[in-house]
Image (cartoon, rainbow, N blue to C red):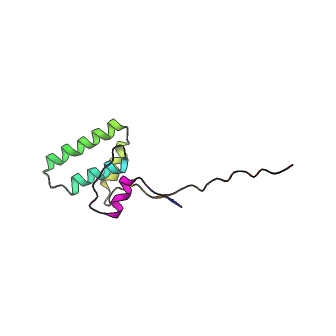
Amino acid sequence: MTQVPCSCCNDPRQSEDFNYFADRCTWCQARRIQYIQRVLRLDQDTKRRRCQAVIEDVQSWGLDESEVRRLAKLPERALQPVTAAPAPTQKPKRGRK
């Protein structure tokens, strides 16, 4: 069984046009930087200012800035990975003595 990531990271898997970036999500903030740098047709100074604003938000929310920067540099879109959920633990059987 797999754990489904939050919708802010799952919906972009369905559509390239999905451009919602949830606050306090490391992957969304990295994808927000990617969107500013790769999609928006802005001059370099404006891109730099907008990306710096994202980094300031990341810092104020207590997210890992270095991880956001690392994810933003990846060639693929930054999306929270779908990971395997831990197997459910079974309750110990109560035996009769």
Instruction: Determine the residue located farthest toward the left in the rendered image.
Output: 43
Residue 34: percent from the left, percent from the top? 27, 54
Q: Which of 29 and 70 is in front in this view?
A: 29
Q: How many numbered marks does the figure carry?
A: 0
The residue that appears at 35% across and 38% down in the rendered structure is: 61
Instruction: Determine the residue located farthest toward the top in the rendered image.
Output: 60
Say left or right for 4 vs 97. Answer: left
Q: In this view, does 53 lie above or below 20?
A: above
Q: Is the magenta stretch mostly helix, strand or loop?
A: loop
The residue that appears at 54% across and 61% down in the rendered structure is: 1
The residue that appears at 15% across and 55% down in the rendered structure is: 41
Residue 29: percent from the left, percent from the top? 31, 48
Say left or right for 67 vs 36. Answer: right
Residue 89: percent from the left, percent from the top? 64, 53
Q: Is residue 80 magenta?
A: no
Q: In this view, does 43 lie above or below 76?
A: above
Q: Is residue 20 magenta?
A: yes
Residue 91: percent from the left, percent from the top? 69, 51
Say left or right for 63 vs 34. Answer: right
In the image, the segment drawn in magenta is: 5-24
The residue that appears at 28% across and 50% down in the rendered structure is: 32
Q: In this view, does 18 lie above or below 49?
A: below
Say left or right for 19 vs 11. Answer: left
